[in-house]
Amino acid sequence: MTSPETTARAITVEGLSLSIRDFHLSGIDFALSGGEILVILGPNGSGKSLTLETIAGFHRPAAGRVLIGGRDVTQLAPERRNVAFMVQNFGLFPHLTVRQNVAVGLRKRRASPERHAAALPHGDVAGLLDYFDITQLAQRAPHSLSAGEKQRVALARALAAEPDLFLFDEPFSALDAHTRDQLREELASFLRRLSIPAIFVTHDHTDAMVLADRIIVLRGGITVQAGSVQEVFYKPANVFVARFIGVENILAGRIAGSCEALSTVAIGERMLRAAGPQVASGAYVQVGVRAEAVSIHSVGSASAPGVNRFVARVTEVRILGPLATVQIDCGFPLKAYVLAQQARDLELIPGRTVEAEIAPASVRLMFD
């Protein structure tokens, strides 16, 4: 049985559809429990922000419904949905101090007598400042804060109003890579502790890897794949998803046969084995292999030939801190990630002959 608290901190979206000018958002479906994080991925113009804005109440759908905290809010105005919407600059009031910004959220909760005001033990301004470790910033103005400090203040203000749902519209897109990495980890930690569902819109697949419990990938207003992080990143539904989430090796091939739950794919003159559902011989497929799934060994290091073990020639090596990217030619091109120390130990330089190995379970067959 679903508890009242679980229902209060949950969201369900059913068949959400609408059209704005010549763009159509069609049949968006998902459900989140309290504390779960959904990341909506997709390229620019795929409908990510439109989905978020419709859930927030800025657009009225042509079909479908939105339930937040157990209420059907499909026809309600944004201010009646009890949703915290955070954008790129975190939306702090520039003329107010940190303390005053947080107090705005608290006043909103007190103005709504139906809210469960005792639900948060840190529900006054001092408690929220302490919870987000920003007490020392209480008298500061937003313009004097770092990006990380602004994020904490924005979260404190949002939590003060006890929202039923957090919405984030690419809050890291204007930040440098180092700051982005820091804030992403910090945000993930905060959200996991709050037991409030959150939806995070981004085009950055690293955001999804760090934050998501579940992922929806949109293309042209349509869901092309939905599932867990493992399902989407390691079992992409098609070439579009594979390319978007950064699968480094995508190769064209043809099914040459199958045996013992393995399909044999002809890629040029080489044969690659893939685990998974049987596919009819002669079918043309795309093969996806993540770079971290490609192992590199010195020639003759294996006591017996393995499945998908090929003699290869190194064509390029780039050291990137503790990792190295290695381009090899084994009858078809492959990119591999190895530890930088391994690259040095194996003396990986252009022209070096090595052996590359790929587990059949790491070979993904895709169709478009």
Image: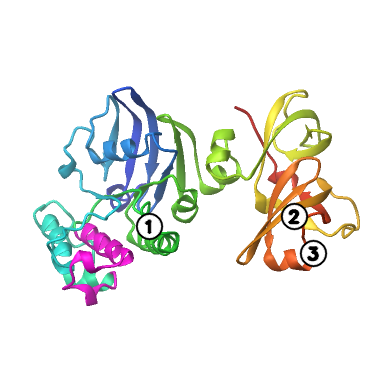
Q: CA distance from mark 2 to mark 3?
A: 12 Å
> Is residue 117 positioned above or below 239 on the image?
below
- State which region is magenta: 132-160
Mark 1 or mark 2, which is nearer to you? Answer: 1
Type of colouring: rainbow
Amino acid found under the numbered disc labelled 1: Leu
Amino acid found under the numbered disc labelled 2: Ser
In the picture, measured across the screen, residue 55 lies left or right of residue 106, that is right
Mark 2 or mark 3, which is nearer to you? Answer: 3
Residue 184: image quadrant is bottom left
Q: Disc 1 marks which residue? A: 175
Is disc 1 placed on a helix, strand or loop?
loop
User: Which percent across, then down, holds residue 197?
Assistant: 34, 51
Q: Are marks 3 and 1 in contact (CB under 8 Å)?
A: no
Q: Which one is earlier in the sequence, the residue at label 1 or at label 2?
A: 1
Q: Disc 3 marks which residue? A: 346
Residue 365: image quadrant is top right
Q: CA distance from mark 3 to mark 1?
A: 37 Å
User: Which percent across, then down, holds residue 32?
Assistant: 38, 45
Q: Are marks 2 and 3 in contact (CB under 8 Å)?
A: no
Amino acid found under the numbered disc labelled 3: Leu
The C terminus, quarter of image: top right
Is disc 2 placed on a helix, strand or loop?
strand
Disc count in the image?
3
Q: Which mark is residue 161?
A: none
Within-10-Å neighbours for mark 3: few <14, some 14–19, many 20+: some
Is residue 308 or residue 297 the one in the foreground? 297
